[in-house]
Amino acid sequence: MTQPSTLEKLAILADAAKYDASCASSGTTRRDSKGSKTGKGIGSTEGMGICHAYAPDGRCISLLKVLLTNHCIFDCHYCINRKSSNVRRARFSPQEVADLTMAFYRRNYIEGLFLSSGIIKSSSHTMEQLIESARILREEYEFRGYIHLKTIPEADPELVRRAGLFADRVSINVELPTVAGLTRLAPDKSAPRIAGAMDLMAGAIVEGRDARRRFRHAPRYAPAGQSTQMIVGADAASDAEIMTKSSGLYGAFGMRRVYYSAFSPIPDASAVLPLKRPPLMREHRLYQSDWLMRFYGYSLDDVHAAADPGGMLPLDIDPKLAFALKFRDRFPVDVNRAPRELLLRVPGLGVRAVNGIVSARRMRRLDLADLARLTQSLTKVRPFIIAADWRPVILADRADLRAIVAPRASEQLELFA
Ligand code: SF4
């Protein structure tokens, strides 16, 4: 059989990588060229939003997103690259990955690399190959651009730790929200091993940061931290269970991001998988809830409260609005007096609008016209606030409130079709 050309391999391995959502490249710091052999170095991680996919927060970043190989000795049911899958296989050497990255970079196609892999021979062997690709880029080509390395939890812990020396961001996929789901759908993987690798990485990141504070020349260690990805809708886990898992991951391992990836049916799918993908809106609601916990001061209990008794978030309205409709006694909030944390709870007010309100009200009392300049949807905000010239009717008396403030479900769903 003839060997595929580099271009054919790229087509196979870039296509195989598209199922991984966890490649947004935010939050790194610049690698400067001090200490490089030539004093120059190539590439920069500044400017953050680099990709050739849309990240969940809407930014577009240009990364070469590719697998080292789509051969795999594991048999995760949800994965197109599993060993029992009938797909065309290909494999790059670390040198080829490095050369491709540089060729794309020099042509200005990309600003960084997202590299993952199926497992060949053994987890440690694969991890060595991933690290070698990044090492060649950093040490031989003096590449200073963004590198995101997927690490393999089953590999030798020393190798997992080494990945952070070359990568800006490292990630270890948690895969599924529950241990039962993981055991059923990824029988070769182990929840304790995944948690162990995340813990090790979290410790190494803290040590690396600490060393940089104390010693100016200490090497950078995964400056953009670690992230993970969870598949949504391949098992029976509810949104409440997914958010519980996320909250634990942020708390225990200092995750920079948890990515939610709606399960997408694959060719020759295993019989244990659902036939249909979950609505994309479900993925979006999970991201909104994640955002509420990280930037809006909502607790996990608050997010659970926004869900229905079965633990599912409503699809037709966002979780912040769902929470406000359930706890109407906490509104209206006076925009001229309320503390920032209460303003952040008002449906329709984002962080930027709240910052604008807090700074503008130092000068004068704000009325509806002022708010209209600061928010996008005064219709949504109005029932939940008091302004200088506005006081709504008691919310508990408004049986039609949901219909007034919620955009028509069909309009919202169209946006995500
Ligand atoms: S380890 Fe599982 S998820 Fe990863 S490539 Fe292999 S089959 Fe796919």
Image (tube, helix red, strand yellow):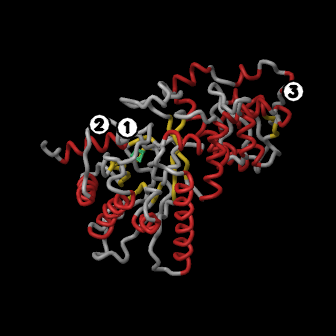
Residue labelled with disc 1: 80
Q: Mark 3 vs mark 2: give the one in front.
A: 2
Among numbered discs 1 and 3, the one appearing first in the sequence: 1
Disc 2 residue type (three-letter): Val
Is 241 displayed left or right of 365 in the figure? left
Q: Is residue 85 above or below residue 135?
A: above
Instruction: List x then y, in percent, for residue 125.
Output: 34, 61
Q: Is residue 38 above or below residue 117?
A: below
Image x and y of residue 117, in percent: 36, 51
* Mark 2 element type: loop
Which amino acid lies under the numbered mark 3 shown in the image of this protein?
Answer: Ile
- Label 1, ligand 1: CB separation under 8 Å: yes
The kind of secondary structure element at disc 3 is loop
Q: Position of residue 273 (x, y in %)?
A: 48, 30
Residue located beneath label 2 in the image:
87
Quickly name the residue at label 3. 394
- Report crowding for label 2: few under 14, some 14 to 19, many 20 or more residues within 10 A (C-alpha): some
**CB atoms of marks 2 and 1 within 8 Å:** yes
Q: Nearer the viewer, residue 139 or 128?
A: 128
**What is the spatial separation of the Cα atoms under label 2 and label 1, in whole angstroms?**
8 Å
Kindly tell me whether residue 367 is visible in this rendering.
yes
Q: Which mark is residue 372?
A: none
Q: Amino acid at mark 1?
A: Ile
Q: Position of residue 365 (x, y in %)?
A: 79, 42
Label 1: state its secondary structure. Answer: loop
- Contact between labelled residues 3 and 1, with CB atoms less than 8 Å apart: no
User: From the image, which quarter does the N terminus lie in?
Assistant: top left
Q: How many marks?
A: 3
Q: What residue appears at the point 32 percent right and 39 percent down from the top-left corner?
A: 15
